[in-house]
Image (cartoon, rainbow, N blue to C red):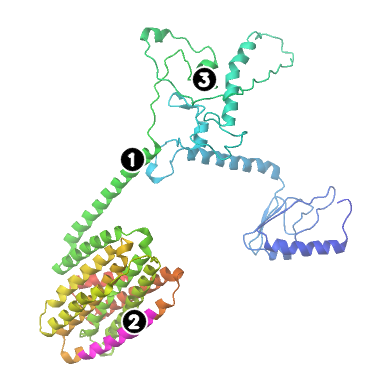
Amino acid sequence: YAREMSDQYKALERESLARWVSEADVVITTALLPGRPAPRLVTAPMLAAMKAGSVVLDMAASPRGGNVELSRPNEVVVTPQGVRIIGYTDLPSRAATTASQLYGNNVARFLLSVGPTTSKAMAGRFFPDYKDPAVRAMIVLDRGGWRWPNPAPYSPPGAGDAENRPVGGLDRAQTTMATTINTIPNTIKDDKNISAAASPAPVSPVVKPVPAPPTVPIISKPLVVSPPKAVPVEKAAKAEAPADMAALVGDAYSGTAPTPKKRPPVIKEPLSQDRVLADARNELMFKNNAKLGLYFVLTLLTSGVLSPAPEATQLISVLLLASYAGQQAVYGVKPALHSPLMAVTNAISGLTAVGAIQLLFSESDFALKELQQVPHMLASAALFFSCINIFGGFKVASKTLDLFRQTGDPKEFFSYYLPPVVLAVGGTVLGAVNGYEQIAPVVGIGAATAAISAISQLSDQKTASTGNVLAMSAVLSAVVATLADVYMKYPLASTLDGFGMVAGLVAVAAAVGVTVADKVGPTELPQTVAAFHSLVGLAATATAVGEYIQHSNGYSLNTGELVATFLATFIG
């Protein structure tokens, strides 16, 4: 600023600043000339090019103008683009408050980190973390006992450096402080002849050098408080106070304990932090289990009071048993197998196809003939979406499990599982043709059991592929049992027509699901499972809405069917 720059220089300066200012989140200007207006560095076009939320601090703001075109002294200006321009002229006085807040926040955070008081399991408790070297180094007194200097439990980084090497468990800073504390009594003794009534005239103090630590290892063992010796009550009452600081602190250089003349308090070793945390977590677990038990009992009692018909009670019993069985099956699955677990359970959820098949073959009693085909259209869409999820989901599950296979893994012989599957499918068909009405419900129960068993097989890598194949068999058996059920309920002609439509929808949906799954890479498998699962929700909702429309807007549905329809719509 010895001389003013040329106009060409200023133009180049503004051009350069414009590029940098537009990319910056924070801009601070400091250019101020004594006795002259501050140079204009940041113009309005530069401010307009900044991102919303950016901040400009004009430290040269004054009544005569600042470095920023739109700044005003002692004000915060917000531009139409959302840029904040700070023009405070009392920044030095504000800095002290900000610095104190920042430093106080650091101190508060450090004190809070001493004990795990922020964790949910330790709420309302204070427990120093004795394993933390920063915490150990700051503890001087703990429950009435002298704890400083605390031996370091490990060698910190740079332990090989002679400058920072711990000696006897203490680092260089602790050793220096121990030296200072032990020199305090000697200093007091040397200066005890100074009269309290001495002249107040200034006296040059005599600074004595602090004795250097011995060249040999100054501490051969950690500071240990010896167990107190039994002292008669009469003698303990007459005990005198320590004569100097050394009697209280002890010889920190030799590693011996303090030699107090009073009986020291008995220091009880604290419970380990792991033990305290374990007790706290255990207590929290018991509380949560008690709350869960209360909610469960209240739900049962409420259901018993509000249940108007046996159908609703039967639905609740099936739901509870299925929920418990599914939870137990999923609980044992290892985290590494969560991706194939997600794919298999998603494919099993494609059994929304069962409801779609039942709706597709049922007869409508809806009053308006124009809308009688709506439930069948919804059922067709639900069956299509469900089958895309079934075939695509199992394909994704197989690809996910293949990622876990290694070259030396033993060969798998899944062809031996074919006879039981053929027997289940063929036996169900033959039983339905010969009029055995209970064959379909029994096979359906077996399919449900096989599906739960398939999920439990995913708990181990060795049986995960078996679980995937078992789940495929369960879904196939359930669909065949449903077709057998509708075969015995409806006339043969309409059933055969319906079977042709079902076969066509299943074939197209299978092609779509497998094609999509084949094109998915390893990193996209979880997202694909989520996308397939959204189809299941759509199928469940479509089936529930179609069921409601099918029966004259729900008037002919019993209570259990109404509850199932509501749950399917809500969950879907």
Count the marks.
Answer: 3
| Residue type at numbered disc 3 | Val
User: What residue is pinned by disc 1?
Assistant: 279
Pick whichever, 207 or 289, lies toward us.
207
Q: Earlier in the sequence, mark 3 or mark 1?
A: 3
Magenta span? 496-514
Is mark 3 in CB contact (under 8 Å) with mark 2?
no
Please provide percent x and percent y for residue 365. Answer: 20, 85
Q: Tag 2: Cα neighbours inside 10 Å, few (<14), some, or many (≥20)?
A: many
User: In the rendered structure, which amino acid carries the disc numbered 1?
Assistant: Asp
Disc sitting over residue 262 in the figure: none
**Is 242 contained in the magenta span?**
no
Q: Main secondary structure of the magenta part?
A: helix
Helix, strand or loop at label 2? It is helix
| Callout 1: SS | helix
Q: Is residue 371 visible?
A: no
Residue 406: horizontal and vertical position, in percent? 39, 65
Label 3 vs label 1: CA separation?
35 Å
What percent of the width, then of the height, locates residue 557? 19, 76
Q: For the residues marked 3 and 2, what is the alpha-carbon distance in whole angstroms?
A: 82 Å
Is 211 situated left or right of 498 in this image?
A: right
Q: Nearer the viewer, mark 3 or mark 1?
A: 3
Q: To which quarter of the image does residue 561 belong?
A: bottom left
Q: Which mark is residue 249?
A: 3
